[in-house]
Amino acid sequence: MEPAASADPYALVLRWAERHGVDAARHLAEAEDLADAVAKEITPDNTVDTYAKSWRGWERFCAATGLPVTEGSRGAQVAYATWMLREGRQDGTGYAPQPPRPICPRPPSGCAACRPTSRRPFGQVTPGDAGANL
């Protein structure tokens, strides 16, 4: 499937024309314009702001780890989540400094998820756990 957003929309329309003919390419371009207009109409302003803040966080992560900003591989995503938990806030603190408390109707001793383990709490990851550069 062709990505809807392209750095060069004209190149995308040319590819569509080569594959499907000029008429179909024109209709596909009109559909893209409609999709953009609908998205603009229904997307709340705070969503756009949240996306911008998230992108800045991703850029900080990439600068800190040396990963390319445009690479969203599975490993990069896991490394980003780990980094966010540990130190993702602007002040260098993580987003999950304390482990979440399980919500369980059974007493802690009766539930495998609630039993204490020797593992570190969620969010407390050391560089050795996920790679020295993360």
Image (tube, helix red, strand yellow):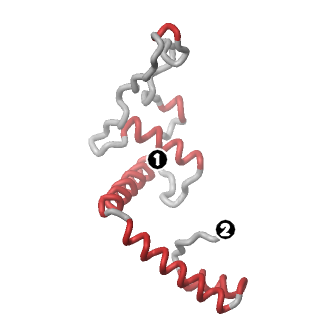
Asked which quadrant contains residue 102, the reply is: top left
| Residue that carries the numbered disc 2 in the rendered image | 1
Foreground: disc 2 or disc 1 = 2
x, y percent for residue 103: 43, 23
Coordinates of residue 61 in the picture (x, y in percent): 42, 49
Circle number at residue 3: none
Secondary element at tag 2: loop
For the N terminus, the quadrant is bottom right
Q: Residue at x 31, y 36 (%)?
A: 93
Rendered view: 72 above or below 13: above
Query: Which residue is at 36% across, 38% downward?
Result: 87
Q: How far apart are the two marked residues, 2 and 1, measured between alpha carbons? A: 31 Å
Three-letter residue code for mark 1: Thr
The three-letter amino acid code for the residue at tag 2 is Met
Report the front residue among 2 and 62: 2
* x then y, percent, for residue 11: 59, 83
Q: Report the residue that reaches farthest toward the right.
A: 19
